[in-house]
Amino acid sequence: MTMTKKKKQSKKQLIAQKNEMAMIEGILEGSPDGIGVVVVRLDCGCRKMAAVAADGEPASKVIIYRDGAESVCDLCKDDNGAYMRVTESFIHWVEPEPDDDQKKSIQLKVLGSAPH
């Protein structure tokens, strides 16, 4: 399998998990301008999420949480979920999704140009 195929397969797998959907729905409920939610998964198991507006600007505060825990891990408390510990990041889009050009523009603005 070529590197390109591996990257394409991993990108297709980056969809919200069932345990993330309740948090995504809650964020969107409180963010009327949100057209999607950025999901950042960290190597410790914590997640950071925030709604994003059509112009790529934040539409909510960043929320950091850990499933089944009362609070985030000690490492996240210290470094607020540092970029170097990100394992996966993507945007969960609201239906109807923006067109591909707008999605690419927002993804570039929010997630940068590094492989996700």
Image: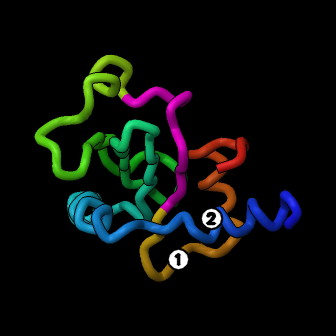
Q: Seen from this angle, which residue lies furthest top? A: 78
Residue carrying label 1 = 97
Quadrant for the N terminus in the image: bottom right
Q: Earlier in the sequence, mark 1 or mark 2?
A: 1
Q: Which mark is residue 73?
A: none
Q: Is residue 91 above or below residue 64?
A: below
Measured as percent of width and height from the top left, residue 48 is found at: 37, 43
Contact check, label 1 and label 2, Cβ < 8 Å: yes
Measured as percent of width and height from the top left, residue 106 is found at: 60, 55
| Magenta segment includes 85 | yes
Q: Seen from this angle, which residue lies furthest bottom? A: 96
| Magenta segment includes 14 | no
Q: Seen from this angle, which residue lies furthest left? A: 70
82 sits to left or right of 9? left
Taking the spot 32% from the left edge, 71% from the top edge, the residue there is 18
**Start-end of magenta stretch:** 81-91
- Label 1: few (<14), some (14–19) or many (≥20) C-alpha neighbours in 10 Å: few
For the residue labelled by badge 2, is the local secondary structure a helix, a strand or a loop? helix
For the residue labelled by badge 1, is the local secondary structure a helix, a strand or a loop? loop
Q: Quadrant of residue 73?
A: top left
CA–CA distance in space, label 1 to label 2: 8 Å
Measured as percent of width and height from the top left, residue 112 is found at: 66, 42
Residue carrying label 2 = 103
